Amino acid sequence: MGLHQQIAPIQEPGSEACVTVGTFDGVHKGHQALLYRLVSVAQRNDARSVALSFSQPPRSVIEPTRQTPHLYDAKTRAALIRDQGIDAVQLIDFDDEIRVMSTEKFLTTLQSSLGMTDLIIGERAVMGHDRQDVDRIAEIANRNGLQLHTVPPVIRKDQIVSSSLVRSAMAAGDVRSAADMLGRLYERGGHVYRGSARAREMGVPTANMEWSRQLVMPAKGIYATWAKLPDGRVLPSATYIGDNPTLGGNLGTFEVHINDFDEDLYDQDISVEFIEFIRPDQEFENPEELNEAIQSDVAKIAQIFTNVPSPN
């Protein structure tokens, strides 16, 4: 489709725009710092703040064998960006036309199509088919009458906050560190389907949720979570991610138990926010040992919630 056609829906003839471009997977604190600067510059210039977010990371298109699970789907990511006070957010596909664009052609297209006067990027950004760094981008911007603003990275525990670092924390089950980098609890949703009811037989009924393999999931195990229901209620819960090895195996299980809750959630969409890792997934000698472990998990999680303020 090309860049011009993709950004056409957010054009406002005669208006000026301050723009940032990236994938923004996670919309973590580093991204938030950049988006904050974007809004500040736009307000100072009496211009629109515009964020262009690639639907798929350019690297996954250039190198199809290097597919990395995303922290959020594109729709959720756009909503999180918009929540930072951005006037216009547009998801764009990294198509063949954009793939071969030089940095200068990319920027002048934004300039002519969006009325871009200011570009806001991270200090370590590279851009275009020609992979220009910030110094070269600054030269190009100056040559075309654009103002370039660069934003330093955000540091946590002597590391630069990045999407890959958040993903690594999630893979290790370190949902606390992930939440610190994101500035919020990591949330995953899914459609509830009818399962085998084996958990219910053990006295711990669960909602079995579908989950996308294209998105990150925390390490296998038990977590203390908030369950967010369709009617707006947010309730303490225990979430299991794993393969059910004790009960014969069921790869990729995603189950949520809400204590003292017996309402029908089948065929509804719910989500959970991950608070704390309790223990890894493991195989027990028999269902009785598994049940004892589950009861212990539920008790530990109930204790955790005595010190966790309600999000409501």
Image (cartoon, rainbow, N blue to C red):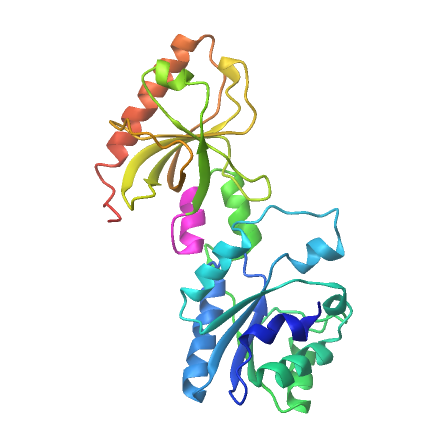
In the image, residue 202 above or below residue 182:
above
Residue span colored magenta:
175-185
- Position of 10 with respect to 111 (left or right) is left
Q: Quadrant of the N terminus?
A: bottom right
Q: Is residue 183 magenta?
A: yes
Q: Percent position (x, y) of residue 216?
A: 54, 43
Res 212 quadrant in image: top right
Residue 158 in sight in this render: no
Q: Nearer the viewer, residue 256 or 32?
A: 256
In the image, residue 184 above or below residue 175:
below
Residue beneath the point at 62% across and 82% down? 113
Residue beneath the point at 55% across and 68% down? 90
State how many labels appear. 0
In the image, residue 187 above or below residue 246:
below
Q: Percent position (x, y) of residue 43?
A: 41, 83
Residue beneath the point at 74% across and 50% down? 64
Q: Percent position (x, y) of residue 38?
A: 47, 76
Residue 260 in sight in this render: yes
Residue beneath the point at 45% across and 48% down? 178
* Outermost residue to the front: 267
- Position of 144 with respect to 119 (left or right) is right
* Outermost residue to the left: 306
Q: Percent position (x, y) of residue 164?
A: 57, 51
- Position of 311 with respect to 15 (left or right) is left
Q: Is residue 205 magenta?
A: no
Which SS does the magenta portion mostly show?
Answer: helix
